[in-house]
């Protein structure tokens, strides 16, 4: 579970810091060769829509929501760590009182 949580936090941190330059390049750059597309970082890109008249709409990841989620998960992790600390402390003080 901790491994999965750690992986999720890393991905959220990447989303929070990602740049949108490559998403813009994808939409506006016209090149006959498509090999450069594989090198783009499209982490921030949520959706691309192009209509029949040629206009383009791009949707990017909502960074504010990502920051909120990171703050929430961070607070939960701190609460868990505090609870573990106090359980260990109570166990240790209980053992000391018995001796």
Image: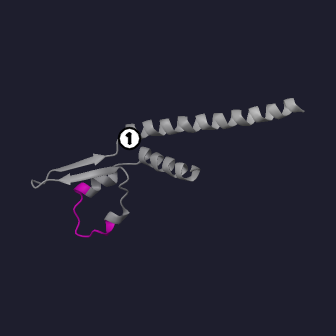
Q: Residue at x 57, y 53 (%)?
A: 3
Instruction: Where is residue 40? Give x, y as percent.
Output: 35, 59
Image quadrant in which the C terminus is located: top right
Asked if residue 84 is among those painted magenta in the image, a careful observer would answer: no
x then y, percent, for residue 49? 20, 52
Residue at (59% x, 34% y) in the render: 79
Side of 18 relative to 75 (left or right): left
Task: Name which quarter of the figure residue 32 lies in.
Answer: bottom left
Looking at the image, residue 83 lies above or below residue 18: above
Determine the image quadrant of residue 78.
Answer: top right
Residue 56 image point, x, y percent:
18, 51
Q: In this rendering, is residue 37 above or below 66?
A: below
> As drawn, which residue projects farthest toward the left?
53
Instruction: Name the residue: 75% across, 32% down.
Output: 90
Q: Residue furthest right?
A: 99
Looking at the picture, the colour scheme in use is: one colour
Crowding near pointer 1: few (<14 within 10 Å), some, many (20+)?
A: some
Q: Secondary structure at mark 1?
A: helix
Looking at the image, residue 11 sits to the left or right of residue 42; the answer is right
Is 33 inside the magenta-drawn segment? yes
Q: Residue 10 in the image: x percent, y percent?
A: 50, 49
Mark 1, residue position: 63
- Residue sitting nearer the eye, 48 or 26: 48
Point out the residue furthest to the front here: 98
Q: Nearer the viewer, residue 49 or 18?
A: 49
Look at the picture and state if 24 lies above or below 78: below
Main secondary structure along the magenta-highlighted residues: loop
State which region is magenta: 27-36
Residue 86 horizontal side relative to residue 33, left or right: right
């Amino acid at each position: 579970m901790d491994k999965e949580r750690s992986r999720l936090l890393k991905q959220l941190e990447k989303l929070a810091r990602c740049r949108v330059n490559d998403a813009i390049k994808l939409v506006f750059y016209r090149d006959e060769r498509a090999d450069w597309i594989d090198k783009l970082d499209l982490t921030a890109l949520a959706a691309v829509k192009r209509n029949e008249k040629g206009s383009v709409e791009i949707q990017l990841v909502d960074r504010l929501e990502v920051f909120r989620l990171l703050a929430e998960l961070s607070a939960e992790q701190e609460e868990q760590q505090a609870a573990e600390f106090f359980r260990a402390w109570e166990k240790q003080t209980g053992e000391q009182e018995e001796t």
